[in-house]
Image (tube, rainbow, N blue to C red):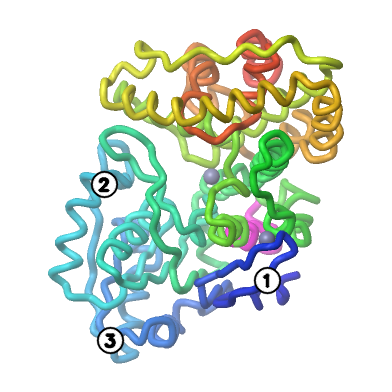
Amino acid sequence: MRNLANELLGSRFACECGREHLLPIRQFVYEPGAVDALGEIVREASGAKRAVVVADVRTWEVCGRRALNVLRRSGCHAEQMLVADGPHDGPVCDDATFGALLPRLREAQADVVVAVGSGVINDLCKWTSFELGLPYVVVATAASMNGYAAANVAARIDGVKVLVEARPPVAVIAEPAVIEQAPREMTTAGFGDTIAKYQSNTDWAMDNLLSDEYYCGFCAGIVNDIEHLYLDHPEDVAKGNSRAVGGLFEALFWTGAAMTLVGTSAPASGGEHLLSHTLDMAADVHQRRHDLHGRQVGIGTLFSAALYERILALEAPAPASLPARVDRAFWSSPPVFEAIAKQYEAKRANLEIAARSIAKSDVWDRLRACVAPLTKSPATIQDWLRRAGGALTAADIGCSREQLASAVLHMHEIRKRFTVVDLAWLVGALPGAADEIIDEWLIG
Ligand SMILES: [Zn+2]
Ligand SMILES: [Zn+2]
């Protein structure tokens, strides 16, 4: 599988789904000493002579200084650029940070951007380099999320979490020793982001059945052959075991690549991700902290699995009722409310198509047969998260029961893609199941 998948790098290929896929990432290197080859990698990838190494104060110490020295030794003109921290710990990927970084990069007249970091630094470099028409390379410092190989940037613009279209890096490189020594909650966050694919792929297949949405089985199953490395013994992820963390890092790379291959986030982001995005947005509106993306996604994955379990138990769904409209009071900030209301309006046509479909008994039976083998049980998800040392409860992600419950009841409002959360509203499982699932699964 690994060799087969590596052949996809930098290639265009005809897929069993009927489409041609393109993966513009040319190199993926995960091995000891990978940073020492950075000069060569950057030259091969972009022919670059002038590089800017972008990091935050922590990732600069982890790998940034070394990356800069390696580049300089290789004859490249390289300079350092630190991104300042936001109000809570690390930097944030928002319009203000983007606006500050962009002119600095322009002034540096770089011809390649080298990101040294994980989620936010990777996203900021992807976004700014795309805006400047420059290639970027990422030196990853944690197995914390699957955005390395993705084309999209998860940004906050005017207070709203959005996906900005950009381009993936030309190369992703990382050293096992660095990834294994990253803060443990970052690695377990990556574990949460990876196991989410079971639920996002279930949503994707459901969409394919209900509304004929495009689906690619190859991309949905892109990490099937390597997931035993971290799923057979999830406690190895908690221990920082090389084989498990390496497998996890590869899975993060390839699930991100799957999004690039199909051109949407469908293979790796479904209803389970909405909980994390909603918690982030609610925290921003109320100026609270939120937890790491993947830790919240793990909780969302558990919730999605529990929701599917209830939905699958329905012999025949209740007559569909469309979910509540966007709640102005919950979103409180007017620009945030307006942006969300627009997204939700865009979903209404999909909701109506799905409602008409599931009212037909043969469709309902086919849906149950299609979904049952794809979704995981909440007990399995909880067991994996517990053994990997991930967040399990509202308290683990710094959330009160009320905050979690209100996020659950508003998360269907924020994106136009149809997910299990919409299905749950349509068949009458929500809002009733929200409290029951929280009590059964998400309160310690
Ligand atoms: Zn395909
Ligand atoms: Zn994610």
Q: What type of secondary structure mainly makes up the magenta span?
A: helix
The amino acid beneath tag 3 is: Lys
Which percent across, then down, holds residue 374?
79, 40
On the image, numbered disc 2 is attached to which residue?
Answer: 85
Q: Residue furthest bottom?
A: 75
Q: Is residue 247 magenta?
A: yes
Viewer-side label of 1, 2: 1
Density class for disc 3 (Cα within 10 Å; few <14, some 14-19, many ≥20) is some
Residue 193, label in figure: none
Vertical placement of residue 92 versus 298, above or below? below
Q: Quadrant of the C terminus?
A: top right
Residue bounds of the magenta highlight: 238-253
The residue nearer to you, when weighing 423 against 56, is 423
Give x and y (percent) for residue 279.
45, 27
Question: Mark 2: which amino acid?
Answer: Asp
Q: Is residue 83 above or below residue 301?
A: below
Pointer 1 residue: 14
Is residue 434 toward the left or the right of residue 148 in the image? right
What residue does disc 3 label? 49
